[in-house]
Image (spheres, rainbow, N blue to C red):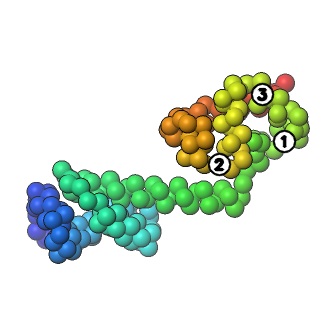
């Protein structure tokens, strides 16, 4: 049976690593890598992916140069976030390979595409969006990312993301109303 590891020891080792002791990081990896892999295997259901995620999590931890109150909890949170990032990226890649029919960046049912013409789409966007929303959405449709849009419009990036979400909901509702009429 393995020895019991107190988290206080891990916190001390982490602080030693932050002070320049590389052997402290090696010790942490030796102590926690197996349990981290088991944790990730439960999430990923794949040993190779679990190893990749664990490796990426350790790399992120090694780059993190701040003190941590609970090393083990923070490590598992970083690993979970890495898994979410990888999983999300893979879903984006699949959606790019097999894109759903879309109008101005809004996924729609194929039958809606047959009913809507370019003129109808432009009218919908103008009728349900404010001028500011319309400008933001046009930038989004032209391929600008949220950071670029925030710089062009002089608003916070988070505000851009929130507004894009609101605009999507408005447009989806407008498309549904149009296709149901």
User: Height in image: 66 above or below 135?
Assistant: below
Instruction: Confirm or deny contact between disc 1 and disc 3 (CB under 8 A).
Output: no
Please tell me which of labels 1 and 3 falls first in the chain: 1
Residue 94 image offset from top left, x and y in percent: 64, 60
Instruction: Provide the residue designation for mark 1.
Output: 113
The quadrant in which residue 15 appears is: bottom left
Residue 9 picture quarter:
bottom left
Q: Residue at x 71, y 58 (%)?
A: 98
Secondary element under disc 1, as helix, strand or loop, is helix
Q: Do labels 1 and 2 touch, CB within 8 Å?
A: no
Q: Which mark is residue 126?
A: 3
Q: Is residue 54 visible?
A: no
* Residue 149 appears left or right of 5: right
Q: CA distance from mark 1 to mark 2?
A: 24 Å
- Marks 1 and 3, how far apart at CA: 18 Å
The residue under the point 30% across, 57% down is 76
Within 10 Å of disc 1 (Cα), the crowding (few <14, some 14-19, many 20+) is: some
Disc 2 from disc 3: Cα separation: 20 Å
Residue bearing mark 2: 144
Q: Earlier in the sequence, mark 2 or mark 3?
A: 3
Q: Secondary structure at mark 3?
A: helix
Q: First in sequence: mark 1 or mark 2?
A: 1
Between marks 2 and 3 in the image, the one whose residue lies nearer the viewer: 2
Task: For label 3, count other residues whose C-alpha is less than 10 Å away and answer few (under 14), some (14-19) or many (20+).
Answer: few
Locate the C terminus and report the quarter of the image it occupies.
top right
Q: Nearer the viewer, residue 141 or 132?
A: 132
Q: Position of residue 82 (x, y in %)?
A: 41, 59
Q: Nearer the viewer, mark 1 or mark 2?
A: 2
């Amino acid at each position: 049976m393995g020895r019991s590891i107190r988290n206080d020891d891990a916190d001390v080792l982490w602080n030693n690593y932050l002070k320049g002791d590389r052997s402290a990081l090696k010790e942490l990896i030796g102590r926690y890598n197996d349990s981290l892999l088991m944790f990730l295997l439960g999430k990923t259901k794949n040993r190779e992916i679990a190893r990749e995620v664990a490796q990426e999590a350790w790399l992120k931890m090694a780059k993190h140069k701040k003190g941590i109150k609970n090393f083990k909890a923070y490590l598992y949170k970083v690993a979970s976030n890495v898994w979410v990032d990888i999983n999300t990226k893979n879903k984006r890649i699949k959606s790019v390979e097999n894109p759903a029919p879309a109008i101005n960046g809004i996924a729609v049912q194929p039958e809606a595409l047959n009913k809507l013409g370019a003129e109808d789409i432009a009218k919908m966007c103008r009728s349900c969006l404010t001028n500011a929303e319309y400008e933001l959405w046009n930038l989004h449709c032209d391929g600008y990312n949220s950071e670029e849009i925030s710089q062009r419009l002089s608003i916070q990036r988070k505000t851009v993301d929130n507004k894009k979400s609101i605009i999507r909901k408005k447009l989806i509702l407008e498309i549904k109303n149009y296709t149901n009429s």
